[in-house]
Structures are given as C-alpha cells and as structure tokens.
Amino acid sequence: MTDKYNDIALEFDSLSIGYSKNEPVATNLSAKVSWGENIALVGQNGSGKSTLLKTLSLLQAKLHGTITINGKNSDHLDDKDKAQFTGIVLTRREVIANMTVEDLVMLGRYPFTPWHGRLTKEDLKKVSNALEATGIYKKRKSLLSELSDGQLQKAWIARVLAQESKILFLDEPTSFLDQPSKMEIFGLISDLVRKENKTVITATHDLDLAIQKCHRFWLLNEKGELVDKLPEELIMDGSINDLFAGKGFEFDLDQGRFIRKNKFSRNYNIKGSPHLVKWVEHAFNKHNISENIPEKLSVTESDKKLIFRLGEKEFTRMSQFLESIKSM
Ligand SMILES: Nc1ncnc2c1ncn2[C@@H]1O[C@H](COP(=O)(O)OP(=O)(O)OP(=O)(O)O)[C@@H](O)[C@H]1O
C-alpha cells in the first residue's frame, strides 16, 4: 500500500464516534476527501470535532462504520501504514520534561527506524527539513518548556511533518496564538497542501482564517450531522451563522468576516472620509452615545494627524473627542 495512491485519500461511511460507555457523540457520518485538499472541521464546543479527528487518525476506536484510507479499510492497516498515512497534533500539547524541540521532532521518525532505534542520516535530514518548514530550526536545541505557545505548536507540527504522514489531522492548531502566528500556521498548512499534495483536516474555531484558506468545511451541526460544503456555500445559504447561534455574532456579507451583532448600531451625522467615519462610529456605538448630538461633528486628516471637531472645539485624540461628547 505504501507507494500506490488511490484518488481518494480518506473516506468514511456510516461512522459512529464516541466513548464506549457513553452515548455516541455522533452517528452516521459520511464524507470523503482527495489528496491535496484542505478541510476545516468546524462546529460548536462539544460537537465532536476532537473525537472525529482522533477516530479518523485511528488513535481512537470507531464505534461503528468504515474508514478507508488510500483505498484500504482501516481495520486492515498495520502500524507502519498508520504512521505513514495519518499524523495527528492534539489540542492538549504536552510539554515533556527535559525534551528539546529536536528530540520531539525525532520521535516522528521512530515508526520507521529498525529495531536498534538509531536514526539514519536520511532520518536526520527529514527532521531538519521539518524544523525548517515550520520555521523553528533556530530553536531546535531549546527545551519544550522554554517555548512560547506558538513555537510549541510549530514543534508539534514539525513532529508530524518529520513522520511524513500523508494525511494530517490538526486539532485547534491556532488556539492560544496571536493573530500573526495564527496566520502563519494557516499559511504553513496551505503550503503543505499546495506544495506537497498533503491532505489536511483542521479542527478550528478561527472561522475567518478557515474561510480564507480552507477548500471545504465539514460542519458538525447541532443535529449531529456532518455538512460538507464549500465555505462560500455556507456563507451564501446563511448556515455559517448557525455556528454562532445565540452567541451574539453574525457573518457580515460585505466585510466577509464575523462581527458582533450590534442591536444598537446607529449612524451619526459625522463629516469625513468613509474609513475615518466608520471607526468614529465604531467607538460611538461601543460607548452607546446617543445620535442626537446638537453640535456639528467632523473628522479630518491633515499632515498625517487626525483632527476631530465638535462644533467650534478641536481635538487631536479620539478619546478627548469622545469624552467631550459624553459630557454634553
Ligand atoms: N475522554 C472522554 N470520555 C468521555 N467523553 C468524552 C471524552 N472526551 C470528550 N468527551 C465528550 O465527547 C463530546 C465531544 O467532545 P469533543 O472534545 O470531541 O468536542 P469538540 O467539538 O472538539 O469540542 P471543543 O470545540 O470544545 O474542543 C463532549 O460531550 C465531551 O464531553
């Protein structure tokens, strides 16, 4: 099975997932994914994303149904096939005492080493390639306990890259990261898909980034169904909003991102260029300022400085402008 590629990387049919003593988390799930596809697995907290990833990566036993990986029933895969085809990065990233980044990434090669467990030159090359690809080569000698959350995340991704698994399952790889690091991780995933034809399935709550980067969404909805659609289809049919049902967010079709629903959104009579007015209104709405302001309001930009006018008064800081309006 190792060298031949089926068209379909992964397929599952009538799959039930869960923990044996309890009610199944979800039943009757079916979908398929080709090589080189980038899937976002989305759904509310507790909908079963982690359970599905662990089941598809064969880390956890399925309750019912079939999983087919590269054309072969998962029940008939040996451990080497499993390591070659599936690699998972879990949400709870362990910090193993006294382990360096390089040690962790080397673990990715162990399914393929002979009985004596020594890594060959080729294995070491794969380890350094994985460290380079994730941008943490310089940190290879650092202890895991010395890394930032983003670096630790990259170290775990490097471990599955060194394993050279063809299908990667990433469980919330961007949780705890700042916005630039989130974008970097999603960029890295896109590169792996585009340049190496890997199939990546990412459970995520970062919907804006997933909409930008992922080819398809698998949405685990509140009925326990798996909806398999393009993100654009979910946006256009309105079902993307179901993800935030009752949580005060909605997808803004003009801005192409999720925004907090603002029941009290008002338009003020402010003169100025649209982008300046937009941010002044943003602050006014947040501070719940009444739109009935007796004075003329304007915001202008001159010599890269902003000038806020309230009747005859001028301010260079929006905070002073806001305070003055609040005190009227
Ligand atoms: N080890 C476990 N034993 C029993 N039940 C579990 C276990 N892990 C998770 N569950 C239950 O399975 C259900 C699905 O959990 P899961 O972690 O898969 O959801 P999730 O969509 O990944 O959630 P989140 O977005 O909050 O990470 C939940 O009801 C959870 O309580």
Image (tube, grey):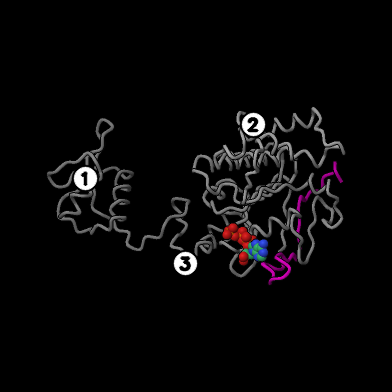
| Above or below 192: residue 208 | below
The residue where tag 2 is placed is 140
Disc 3 on helix, strand or loop? loop
Q: Residue at x 87, y 46 (%)?
A: 1
Per the model, the C-alpha gap separating discs 3 and 2 is 44 Å
Which residue bears the numbered disc 1?
Answer: 320
Mark 1 burial class by Cα count in 10 Å: few <14, some 14-19, many 20+: few
Q: Residue furthest left?
A: 312
Q: What mark, if any, has residue 246 been given in the picture?
A: 3
Look at the image and tell me in which quarter the C terminus lies: bottom left
Which residue reaches farthest bottom?
23
Residue situated in front as seen by the camera: 23 or 119: 119
Report the magenta residues as a range. Answer: 1-28
Is residue 99 inside the magenta stretch?
no
Assess whether residue 26 is covered by the magenta stretch: yes
Tell whether 1 sits left or right of 306: right
Question: Which amino acid, by three-letter code, is at mark 2?
Answer: Arg
